[in-house]
Image (cartoon, rainbow, N blue to C red):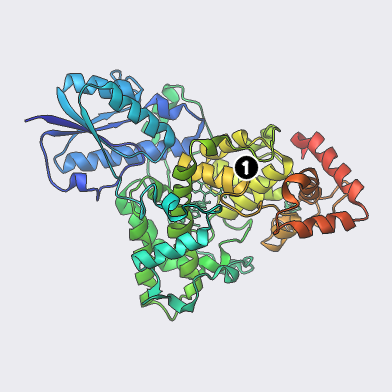
Amino acid sequence: MSKTLRLILGDQLNSTHSWFESPDENVIYLMAEMRQETDYVMHHIQKMMAFFAAMRCFADQLKNEGKQVRYYKLDDPENPQKLDKIIDQLIQKEAIEKFEYQLPDEYRLDQQLKDICKSISIDSEPFDTEHFLTERSFLAQFFEGKKTFLMESFYREIRKKFEILMDGKKPEGGKWNYDHDNRSALIDKRLLRKNLEFKHDLSGIFQMIQDQNIKTFGNVNPEDFQWPISRAESFDMLDHFCEKLLVHFGDYQDALTTWDPYLFHSRLSFALNTKMISPLEVVQKVESHWHRKRDEISISQVEGFIRQIIGWREYMRGIYWAKMPEFSKMNFFGHERSLPSWFWTGKTKMKCLSMSINQSLDLAYAHHIQRLMVIGNFALLAGIDPDEVDTWYLGIYIDAIDWVEITNTRGMSQFADGGIVGTKPYVSSANYIKKQGNYCSHCAYSPNQKTGDKACPFNSLYWHFYDRNRELLEKNPRIGMAYKTLDRMKNKAQILKQADEYLGRIEEL
Ligand SMILES: Cc1cc2nc3c(=O)[nH]c(=O)nc-3n(C[C@H](O)[C@H](O)[C@H](O)COP(=O)(O)OP(=O)(O)OC[C@H]3O[C@@H](n4cnc5c(N)ncnc54)[C@H](O)[C@@H]3O)c2cc1C
Ligand code: SF4
C-alpha cells in the first residue's frame, strides 16, 4: 500500500477534521516545532509556549487514537527546523508516495507550501481546514465589483446562510445590530466574575526555549500557565463564558478599567485561532444557552458576541485573502516614526498605555478596545510606521496570527489600507478613554487639558493627526466636521506646537 504524509501546522489543531474520521495505517501525520516559526518575528514567551503545548497535546491525542505521528520537538537533533527540509527528509525516510496538507491561513506559509509541492517529486493535494464558515474567496466574490467591503452586509449574509440568531427570515429581536447598547463604562466592581484559569506546568517547554536561545519577550510563570491548550479546556472556557460572562458581555465590551484585565471577554481567541474549537461550535453553544436563559440574558449581549465571531473574524479572513500580499505593505499616511521603546517595557506615564501594555506583557492579552482605542490609537496619532506596529502586535498577543493580526492592526487600527476595513480612522482624544472607564483618574496627565505640562498627549496629537493629514482625509464625508472644528479653534497653533513638543520627546511621555 502506498504511504501518505499529512502535514498538520501549529494552528490546525482541528480534531473534528474529516482526515481523522477513519483509521488508516498508511497515513503518517507530521507535526513540527521549527525555528522558521519561532524566529520570523519575536514572539511573546506565552504565545510560543501555548502553541507548543497545544501541539504536543494534539499529537498525543492522535497517538492515543492509534494514528501514526512524527512529531519533531524544537530540540530534536534530527529536526532540520525548516518545513521544506522536514518534508523532504520524511518523504525519503518513510518512502512516502503522496503529500497532503490543509490550506494554511497565512500567506507566507501558503506560498511556501506551493513551492514545496512544486519541488517534490510525488503527488500532493491541499484540503480545506474545515474550520471557518466561509471559504477563502467567499468575501471577494460577495463584494465583487464593489469599492467598499461593508462588514455589516457580510455579517447579515452569514447570519441568514447559517440561520444564526434568526427568527425565520427576520433577525431575532427584530434588529440586526445592537451596537449602540454595547458601549458602557463599568462602574460597579461587584459585577466582575473570577476568571477561569488553567494550571499547567510548562517548565519543560520553557526550559527548552531558553536552552535553544530563542529570542522572546514578555513575562510568564512557567509552572502556572493559564491558557487552554486542549479542545476539552477550550470547551470549559466556552462554558465558563456562557455561564458567567455572557450576561454582561455586550454592555461592557468597550469598557476600560484598572480593576480587571479580562472583564467579560471570552478569552477564546487562542482556542479559536488554533482551531481547537470552531466558530460554529462557539456561536451555536452561545445561542442555545441564550435560548434557555432568555429571561436573564438580553439579546444585545448575545448579538454583540456573535457579531465578533461570524462578523468580524470571518470578515477579516476574507479581507486577508482578497487583498494579500499588497495589504501587508500598505502605508496610506506614509508614517515612518519608530515605536517608542516603552512599548516593550510598559514604562510610560500615560496610565491607559501603561495599563494596556503591561497587561499585554504579563498576560499576552489585551481586549479589543485596549488594542484599538488605547495602543493602536496612540500609534496612529503619533505616526508610527505600520511595519513596526505590526511587528509588535504580531509578537505580543497569544492569538496573533498574520491573517487576523494585520487586517486588524494595519487595517482597522492604523487605517494604513486607506479605508478597506474601516470607513474612517479609529482615533480619539482623551475624551473617549475617559468616558470608557477609570484610567484617566489614575494618570499623571489631565484628560481635560490640551496644552501645558499636564496636558494629556492624546488631546494635542489628535488634532496634529488631522492637521497633518488634511489632504488625505478632508474629503471623507465622515470626517469633514473635524476640520470645521479644527479651523474654528482659537488656540490651534498652540495645540499643534504642544503635539510637536510631545513627539519630539516621545520616549519620555
Ligand atoms: C489592533 C488590533 C489587533 C488585533 N489582533 C488580533 C490578533 O492578532 N488575533 C486575533 O484573534 N484577534 C485580534 N484582534 C481582535 C480582538 O481584539 C481579539 O480577537 C480579542 O481581543 C481576543 O480576545 P477574546 O477572545 O477575549 O475576545 P472577545 O471579546 O470575547 O470576542 C470573541 C471572539 O471574537 C473574535 N473577534 C473579536 N473581534 C475580532 C476582530 N476584530 N477580528 C477578528 N476576530 C475578532 C475573536 O475570535 C474573539 O475570541 C485585534 C484587534 C485589534 C484592534
Ligand atoms: S489622561 Fe490621557 S494619557 Fe492619561 S489615561 Fe487618560 S487618555 Fe490616557
Q: Quadrant of the C terminus?
A: top right
- Nearest the camera: 308 or 474? 474
Could you say whether the residue bearing mark 1 is in a helix, strand or loop? loop
Estimate the x, y position of residue 340 in percent, counting from the top left: 69, 34
Q: Residue at x 39, y 52 (%)?
A: 138
Point out the image quarter for the N terminus. top left
Disc 1 target residue: 416
Quarter of the image for residue 229 reads: top left
Outermost residue, right direction? 490
Identified by mark 1, the residue type is: Ala
Q: Quadrant of residue 51?
A: top left
Residues 210 and 43: in front is 43
- Against 471, residue 69 (above or below) is above
Seen from the viewer's position, the closer of residues 509 and 400 is 400
Residue 20 shown left or right of residue 200 in the figure: left
Q: How many marks?
A: 1
> Residue at coordinates 22% horizontally, 43% vertically from top-left?
61
- Residue 337 in the image: state x and y as whole percent: 71, 33
**305 displayed left or right of 205:** right
Classify residue 360 as left or right of residue 268: right
- Corner quadrant of residue 338: top right
* Residue 246 is at least partly visible in this image: yes
Query: What residue is shown at x 37% (from left), y 56% (from top)?
Result: 279
In the displayed orientation, state which residue is furthest to the bottom.
Answer: 295
Dot 1 alpha-carbon crowd within 10 angstroms: few under 14, some 14 to 19, many 20 or more: many
Q: Residue 215: percent from the left, percent from the top? A: 50, 26
- Does the rendering let one see residue 267? no
